[in-house]
Amino acid sequence: MILGMSVAAFTQLHVIISLIAIISGILVVLAMLSARLMPGMTTLFLILTVATSVTGFMFPTPVDAPRVIGSLDPANVVGVISLIFLALAILALYGYKLAGSWRGVYVISAIIALYFNCFVLVVQSFQKIAFLHALAPTQKEPPFAVAQAILLILFVGLGIAAFKKFRPVAQVPAAA
């Protein structure tokens, strides 16, 4: 049981939160490319991406999972890194209102947080979708590496473009 739910129900909730975070994040990045700020969608993206990372820590760690630092497995490390970038994005947007270099901090941090969500989506897709799992059952095969490389290249390109283009005219929303 996790938060009073079965592991299956909690997993479903976590996946729904993650998918909505990814979709809202994509919309936020597309708005950045048009120099637009979408306050409501941005808030949704940030809150749900934080929720995705936080709920990810609540899953039991498999006994055979590799350890990176102490008792942290790779999934926990991704969650910690994501939360650091989310904190920076939230601070830049709501604390410093995108002033000066904080605009760049926001853009880069938000895009990195979205990248980590999409990175995990690819990992989970190769684990759970039969067709993809057959192509890379251990996630050490070329199809998995190619998928992750394409994702990384896409996000580096989006990050560069958004960094150059995102200069919103509208005021940044006040912290809630």
Image: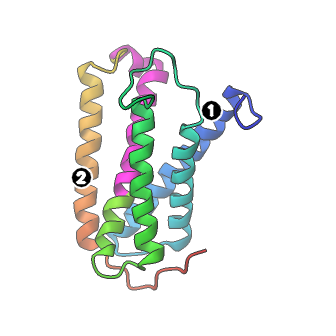
The residue sitting at 39% across, 25% down in the picture is: 67
Going by the numbered disc 1, the residue's amino acid type is Thr
Query: In terms of secondary structure, what is the magenta stretch mainly?
Result: helix
The residue sitting at 39% across, 56% down in the picture is: 85
The residue sitting at 38% across, 14% down in the picture is: 134
Compared to 31, does 13 lie above or below?
above
> Which is more N-terminal, label 2 or label 1?
1
Estimate the spatial distance between the alpha carbons at disc 1 and disc 2, rounded to whole Å: 30 Å
Lateral position of residue 2 relative to residue 174, left or right: right
Q: Nearer the viewer, residue 7 or 163?
A: 7
Image quarter hosting the C terminus: bottom right
Extreme residue toward the right, this view: 4
Magenta segment includes 105: no
Extreme residue toward the front, this view: 70
The disc placed on residue 11 is 1
Going by the numbered disc 2, the residue's amino acid type is Val
